[in-house]
Amino acid sequence: MTQVEPGVSGADVRPTGAVAGSVDLAAAGAVLADRGVRIVLGTAVDMSGVTRAKGVPIDRLEAFVDNGMGASPSWNVFCVDFGIAFTPDLGVTGDLRLRIDPTRLTVVDAGVAWAPASITQQDGGVFTGCARTRLAHVVDRARVAGLRPLTGAELEFVLVQPDGSARSRGAWQGYGVRTALDVAPFLTDVQARFADAGLPLEQVHAEYGADQFEVSIAPADPLLTADRTVLARILVGRAAARHGLGVSFSPQPFPGGAGNGAHLHLSLADAAGPVFSGGTGPHRMTPKGAAAVAGIVAGLPDLQGVLAGSVLSPLRLKPGNWAGAFACWGLENREAAVRFIGATAGNPHGANVELKAIDGSANPYLAGAALVGLALDGIDRDLPLPPEVPVDPVTLPEADRERLALAGSQTEALDALDASSLARHILGDAIVDGTLAVRRYEHATYGDADPEAAAAAYRLVFSC
């Protein structure tokens, strides 16, 4: 992962001379209005992984930043359908505010600009259930510890009909040139929209599964990467709609079909340089790098309910899917949950780790917080690096396979999350309890449903 300071998306709406975190809102609003913007949407991702939005006319931009727009606390525990998973602290009483980040303002469609929102108390105070705020807090903890994390995202999705049904197509070729060229107008539209939005696109290609594609986002500060993940889903969805298509980021859009990952890459650097290279440990890890990997591997079972906690997630998280179904690490091992990528001539971004177990149902802010938080925990506790698994874990002796296997059911993953003091330390009680509420609602509603009915209910909910 690059160690160069990333740019900020939407920079074209900031006046010359503005600094990060400071925007002349009147000037920004005038620029947007000149570009035909009439509505500004602010988004927040709830604990079920669904992106919610409120909008204001462009002349209320300053109010959206300074005062925020009202939102019930129950916004955080809306479910994938019309259900609400109330908790003792998140119900029908009280009010919160959605305040957008003006440094991220980006035009996303004709007449519409977008910015991510943080959820605050009415007086602007911290709301502990805000996923975006929590990620910022974890990143701040890393910086206080003298560490600089960067993350990059890989987003897999399946093209569908606008109503979510399967596309009518010919024979599919995974990674095939024909399958990419067949939808070339869509792919070039995606590239153009990313470029216009200032969102750095590193790769776009056909994936292994039928009608499946992937976009890769360049590494950046973890909060920026999470914001960009939401923006990328919006832009991919707008491009798909323009070409008469729908898009599914669901962990398992169709029973028996390919699952969609939302892999995160992590690099870390301290004052001496990158911690995953330049040392004397395995694959040139430094002691901090080895402890970070150890922390991710050790804590992954506790955070599985956040990273891959939906009722469909276990269908993807199986051996043989390159989904990372085992809590282990290995150099370029795509069946390990933690794939280590060394600093070689073929990797210009430098050494990093890829967490493969994350899927499209995860809240991208909580996924980033979990990954960085686990790495910090490993460093804080100076955890010893477990032995590398250099082979497909399914070839290990049965006792080793059982010891390393991640939870095979949603219930098991959620019970581990509920009992985890580590998860509550990284994410806080409000987020853990809210996540458990929505996921257990999902299990009660869809856990015993016909696989096709469950897949249909989730197919489009994570699309923007």
Image (tube, grey):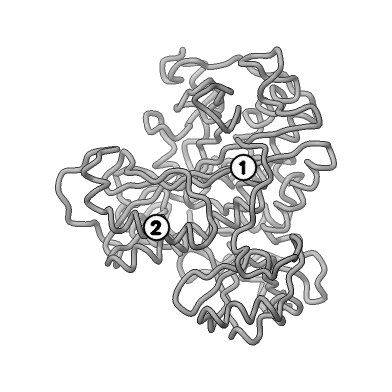
How far across and how far down the image is residue 240, in percent?
A: 34, 62
Could you say which is closer to the camera, residue 196 or residue 447? 196
Side of 445 relative to 198 (left or right): left
Residue 8 to residue 39: above or below:
above
Residue depicted at 75% across the width and 65% down the height = 17
Percent coordinates x, y for residue 378 in the rendering: 73, 29
Q: Quadrant of residue 66?
A: bottom right
Quadrant of residue 438 in the image? bottom right
Residue shown at the point (59%, 64%) measured from the top left:
10
Q: In this view of the protein, which residue sits in the foreground, 152 or 434? A: 152
Estimate the spatial distance between the alpha carbons at disc 1 and disc 2, rounded to whole Å.
Answer: 21 Å
Q: In the picture provided, is 179 more to the left or to the right than 6?
A: left
Q: Which residue is mark 1?
A: 151
For label 2, the crowd category at 10 Å Cα-Cα, with few meaning under 14, some 14 to 19 and many 20 or more, is many
Q: Residue furthest front?
A: 16
Residue assigned mark 2:
190
Q: Secondary structure at mark 1?
A: strand
Q: Earlier in the sequence, mark 1 or mark 2?
A: 1
**Foreground label between 1 and 2:** 2
Residue 261: x and y in percent read: 45, 43
- Give me the residue at 60% from left, 83% from top: 56
Q: Is residue 312 above or below residue 323?
A: below
Q: Is residue 285 above or below residue 253?
A: above
Q: Could you tell me the amino acid type at mark 2?
A: Val
Quadrant of the image containing the N terminus: top right
> Horizontally, is 196 left or right of 415 in the view?
left
View extreme (right): residue: 144
Residue at the image position 34 percent from the left and 52 percent from the top: 158
Q: Which numbered marker is on residue 39? A: none
In the rendered image, residue 5, in percent from the top left (x then y), is placed at: 69, 45
